């Protein structure tokens, strides 16, 4: 049987909620890798157990990625083949992965990324807002540079996408309304692919009112219409 990938480093998107979203190719890559690089070995370990796959796990997260990159690249140069998985979604999209990909490429290591789950795409498509052109902002800075980032987007004409956590959602919606205007259209999706998946659409003022009345729970993707041309 042919190998699922000949690359030394393969980024493997993992389900954002529903485990049925794992692809056959992703399963094969995980099973064939010499080891799996994981954002959280407990989370990835549970996924591998669910899939019936036993592979060594290497911890790689925001607190150790800088010191791990050099040794991982050296191991790949010696012939080891790694699969990389974040807790959910595609590695390097608001998750660790970019540093390792960059240094592997610099070192001449073959890198491949499989297609698969990522939260902002279904949220964008389900929003009903224009999706032929968009800008993904991920998580806003929590302190320094936050307001500056938002002000820079005031006149952005493309649809904008943000990730937000439940305990910061109301703050973010208030700031969005202040900068973009109460009547700017938006959409908020939470718990995508999970049991309590939900998408709420309306003006920023309406969205703020909804989540003021209903306690935010889960992980959120906020989609905001661009400014009128």
Image (spheres, grey):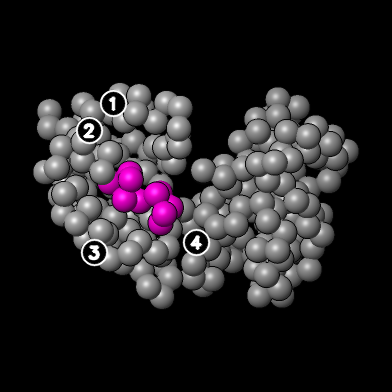
Give the residue drawn at x 75%, y 27%: 107
- Determine the CA span between mark 4 and mark 2: 30 Å
Give the mark nearest the N terminus, 1 or 2: 1
Q: Nearer the viewer, mark 4 or mark 3?
A: 3
Give the residue drawn at x 19%, y 56%: 209
Q: Nearer the viewer, mark 4 or mark 1?
A: 1
| Residue picked out by circle 3 | 213
On screen, residue 24 above or below 29:
below
- Determine the CA span between mark 4 and mark 1: 31 Å
Give the residue drawn at x 70%, y 29%: 103
Q: Quadrant of residue 112?
A: top right
Residue 170, magenta (yes or no) = yes
Is label 1 in contact with label 2 (beta carbons under 8 Å)?
yes
Quarter of the image with the C terminus is: top left
Magenta stretch, overall SS: helix
Query: Where are the magenta residues, as a range?
Result: 164-173
Give the mark nearest the N terminus, 4 or 2: 4
| Residue picked out by circle 2 | 179
Disc 4 packing (10 Å; few <14; some 14–19; many ≥20): many
Q: Nearer the viewer, mark 1 or mark 3?
A: 3
Give left or right: position of 216 versus 14: left
On screen, residue 96 above or below 108:
below
Give left or right: position of 117 versus 122: right
| Residue picked out by circle 4 | 16
Q: Nearer the viewer, mark 2 or mark 3?
A: 3
Q: Position of residue 85 (x, y in %)?
A: 64, 53
Q: Nearer the viewer, residue 148 or 227?
A: 148
Disc 3 packing (10 Å; few <14; some 14–19; many ≥20): few
- SS state under label 3: helix
Q: Position of residue 121 (x, y in %)?
A: 37, 51
């Amino acid at each position: 049987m042919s190998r699922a990938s000949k690359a030394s480093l393969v980024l493997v998107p993992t389900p954002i909620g529903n485990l049925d979203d794992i692809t056959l190719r992703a399963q094969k890559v995980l099973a064939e890798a010499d080891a799996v690089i994981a954002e959280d070995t407990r989370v990835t370990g549970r996924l591998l157990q669910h899939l019936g796959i036993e592979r060594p796990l290497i911890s790689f997260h925001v607190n150790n990625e800088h010191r791990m990159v050099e040794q991982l690249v050296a191991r790949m140069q010696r012939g080891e083949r790694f699969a990389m998985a974040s807790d959910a979604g595609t590695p390097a999209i608001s998750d660790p992965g970019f540093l390792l990909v960059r240094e592997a490429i610099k070192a001449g290591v073959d890198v491949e990324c499989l297609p698969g789950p990522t939260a902002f795409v279904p949220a964008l498509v389900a929003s009903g807002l224009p999706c032929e052109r968009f800008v993904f902002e991920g998580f806003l800075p929590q302190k320094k540079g936050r307001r500056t980032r938002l002000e820079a987007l005031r006149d952005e004409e493309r649809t904008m996408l943000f990730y937000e956590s439940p305990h910061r959602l109301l703050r973010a919606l208030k700031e969005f309304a202040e900068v973009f205007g109460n009547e700017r259209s938006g959409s908020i999706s939470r718990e995508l692919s999970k049991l309590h998946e939900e998408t709420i659409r309306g003006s920023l003022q309406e969205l703020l009112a909804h989540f003021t009345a209903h306690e935010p729970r889960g992980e959120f993707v906020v989609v905001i219409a661009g400014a009128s041309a």
